[in-house]
Image: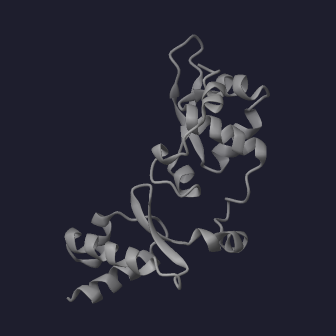
C-alpha cells in the first residue's frame, strides 16, 4: 500500500475511534507496521496544521485522537461536549485543581486548603470520573487519598499530569498547606 493510502487509512481509524488510540493499536487495526503509523501520524499532523482545517491530531492519555482546534471548540462545546462533562462549578474546579496538584490527597487536606467542607465536591468529581480513590494515607484512621483519572486527562486534553500549567510561588504555598 502506498503511503498516501496508509495515511488515509490511519485517518479513518482515528475518525472512527471514540477513545484515544496508541500507535500499536492503530497498527493492529490498520494492519500496517508501527513505523508506517508514525510516519502517517506526522503526515496527518502536518495536514491539520493548515488554516483551512478545523481539527487537529493530538496525544491524550497516551493515545492519538482527533479533536476540534481550540479556536473552534468554544463554539462547539455546548453541543458536542461529552454528555457528562458539562461545565464544572468554580467550587468543583477549585477542588479538582487542589487534587490534581497535590495528589494523592485526603479529604481533610483538601478541606484545610479550601477552608470549607469538600464532601459534596468530591462526590460530584467521583461521579463524573474525574477523580478516584488511589489509596489510604499511612496515619491513624487511614483516611482515603484521592487522585485524578484518565477521564480528567481527557477532559482537559492532557497526555499526562506533568502537562498541568506550572504554579507560581503563591499558588504553590497555598497547595502545600495540607502537607
In front here: 49 or 30? 49
Quadrant where the N terminus sits is bottom left
Judge whether residue 27 can be spotted in this image. no
Relative to residue 137, is residue 125 depicted above or below?
below
The quarter of the displayed image where residue 133 is located: top right
Q: Locate residue 2: give its quadrant.
A: bottom left
- The spot of residue 28 in percent (x, y) is 26, 71
Residue 82 on image: x %, y %:
64, 65
Q: Colour scheme in the image? A: one colour
How many numbered callouts? 0
Residue at 29% x, 78% y is: 30
Identity of the residue drawn at 53% across and 45% down = 164
Q: Residue at x 66, y 27 (%)?
A: 174
x, y (%) of residue 143?
59, 21
Residue 98: image location, x then y, percent: 64, 35
Relative height, residue 51 to residue 117 (above, below): below
Residue 130: tell me if it is visible: yes
In the rendered view, tell whether residue 53 sits above or below residue 177: below
Is residue 115 left or right of 13 when viewed as pictured? right
As drawn, is 161 to the left or to the right of 127?
left
Which image quadrant: the C terminus? top right
Amino acid at each position: 500500500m502506498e503511503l498516501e493510502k496508509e495515511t488515509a487509512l490511519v485517518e479513518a481509524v482515528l475518525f472512527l475511534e471514540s477513545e484515544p488510540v496508541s500507535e500499536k493499536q492503530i497498527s493492529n487495526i490498520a494492519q500496517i507496521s508501527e513505523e508506517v503509523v508514525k510516519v502517517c501520524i506526522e503526515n496527518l499532523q502536518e495536514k491539520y496544521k493548515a488554516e483551512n482545517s478545523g481539527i487537529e491530531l493530538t496525544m491524550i492519555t497516551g493515545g492519538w485522537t482527533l479533536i476540534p482546534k481550540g479556536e473552534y471548540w468554544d463554539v462547539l462545546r455546548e453541543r458536542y461536549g461529552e454528555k457528562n462533562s458539562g461545565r464544572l462549578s468554580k467550587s468543583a474546579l477549585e477542588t479538582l485543581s487542589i487534587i490534581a496538584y497535590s495528589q494523592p490527597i485526603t479529604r481533610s487536606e483538601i478541606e484545610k486548603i479550601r477552608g470549607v467542607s469538600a464532601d459534596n465536591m468530591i462526590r460530584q468529581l467521583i461521579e463524573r470520573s474525574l477523580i478516584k480513590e488511589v489509596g489510604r494515607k499511612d496515619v491513624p484512621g487511614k483516611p482515603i487519598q484521592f487522585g485524578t483519572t484518565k477521564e480528567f486527562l481527557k477532559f482537559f486534553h492532557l497526555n499526562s499530569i506533568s502537562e498541568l500549567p506550572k504554579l507560581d510561588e503563591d499558588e504553590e504555598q497555598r497547595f502545600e498547606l495540607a502537607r
